[in-house]
Amino acid sequence: MIATTARSSTLSELVRNAPAQAGAVAARPRVIVDQAIDPNLLARARASFDRHRRVLTHTDTVVIADFSKASREQRFFILDTNSGRVSKHLVAHGRGSDPDHSGFVERFSNAVGSEASSNGAYVTGDYYPGKYGRSLRVSGLDPSNSNAYARAIVVHSAWYAEPGVIAEHGKLGRSEGCFALPYDSLQEVLQRTGPGRFLYADKLA
């Protein structure tokens, strides 16, 4: 059950009040985060959020991409910090992160021309009309993704990120490092994020 609060919570509060394990009950929790997000990855995101809080304009919504999961799984999470509720989406990773096209991220890279996904914290930027239609710019906040803007890493939709691709091939196609989503999922991202919000991408060892 999700406890809610009238004011906007921070990601730090969400993690502090989340149960340590499934079935555990926190004392008087403000908000309990949907367990769809791995608690260890959520803890990493919380620490990163705390480090970068000063550059964020809004904290009502955060996005977490769990690249520990296969591309056939829903691993792009939009978290409502008022309720702890999470919507789950498919997302493709970069071809440079998966050269054998196994469906798993094998490595990250921040290098220009790598066509790989980068891990770390991002702040969302402006909308713009891109190759795949309306898209969302992001800027990297860590040394591991500092070239994101220069590499034109964005959030966009793509045909190779649609569920039908999984039905045919058992995995999504690959991007050039962008967060490529199904069209319907991107519409939710565009509606709920916008400039100045936190996006975190990583994988657990």
Image (tube, rainbow, N blue to C red):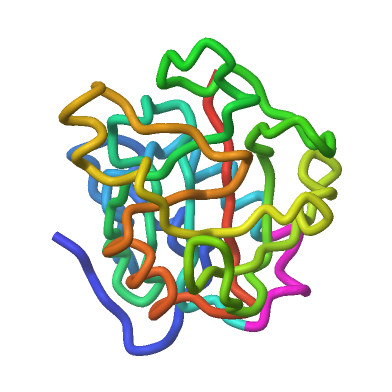
- Image: magenta residue range: 50-57
Q: Quadrant of the N terminus?
A: bottom left
Magenta span has 131? no
Residue 110 occupies quadrant = top right
**Location of residue 89 in the rendering, given as x and y in whole percent from the top left corner:** 31, 50
x and y, in percent, of residue 167 in the image? 16, 30
Q: Is residue 189 above or below residue 111?
A: below
Tell me what residue is drawn at x 72 percent, y 56 percent: 152
Q: Nearer the viewer, residue 33 or 121?
A: 121
162 vs 63: above or below: above
Residue 105 to residue 73: above or below: above
Residue 66, position as x, y percentages in the image: 46, 38
The part of the image, by quadrant, that contains residue 182 is bottom left
Query: Residue drawn at (77%, 45%), measured in percent from left and top?
Result: 145
Q: How far across and down, in percent of the image, does residue 101 sit?
A: 47, 16
Residue displayed at 59% across by 72% down: 197
Q: Quadrant of the C terminus?
A: top right
15 vs 86, left or right, is right
Q: Nearer the viewer, residue 1 or 25?
A: 1
User: Residue at the front extreme?
Assistant: 131
